[in-house]
Image (cartoon, rainbow, N blue to C red):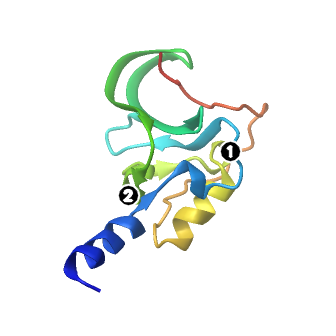
Amino acid sequence: MNERKYSSLENFSNIICPSDLKNQKDRTLVYGYDLERNTFHLYLKDNLFHRIIYNDKISDKIPTTIIDEDYNLENIELHGCIPSKRVYPECSDSDFCKILISRGICVPFTKFTERKENKIFYGYIGS
């Protein structure tokens, strides 16, 4: 193998694509918060990844401040799949988290808290 092929292997092992998921249904994949207490929401919609980080949430539908947003991603770096602080296990997809863990990513779960309702999307999904 030459250096270019080796580099492509390194990059390949550090990314995940929607096609890596067995379940292709639209849903929240990872929901949590970062060190600044901003909400982190990674979700699958229309067979693409979408990631949004926001704060000052008025409701699940209206954040007042969007910190960062990436829509229509055909792949995403593994480290970009988790927030810098905690992940809510009851709002995140177990199969997706298993993939992250199997690829060496430590998912920083917080304490499990039972939710009254199951949702497809747990956070703001952008416009």
Q: Looking at the image, tell me whether mark 2 or mark 1 is earlier in sequence order.
A: 1
Residue 42 appears anywhere in the view: no
**Amino acid marked by disc 1:** Gln
Amino acid tagged 2: His
| Residue drawn at 47 percent across, 21 percent down | 126
Name the spot of residue 51 as percent of width and height, x first. Answer: 44, 36
Q: Residue furthest front?
A: 2
Above or below residue 75? Residue 70 is above
Q: Which numbered marker is on residue 15?
A: none
Q: Which residue is mark 1?
A: 24
Read off the residue under disc 2.
79
Res 12 visible: yes
- Position of residue 1 relative to residue 52, above or below, is below
Where residue 81 sits in the image (x, y, percent)? 44, 51
Between 107 and 1, the one lying in front of the other is: 1
Q: Number of callouts in the render?
A: 2
Q: Is 108 left, or right, of 14 in this rendering?
A: right
Expressed as whole percent of the image width and height from the top left, the position of residue 125 reads 53, 25
| SS at circle 2 | helix
Residue drawn at the location 75% of the way across and 43% of the way down: 114
For disc 1, the neighbor class at 10 Å (few under 14, some 14 to 19, many from 20) is: some
| Image point (59%, 52%), residue name | 19
Secondary structure of the residue carrying numbered label 1: loop
Query: Of 103 and 88, which appears nearest the observer?
Result: 103
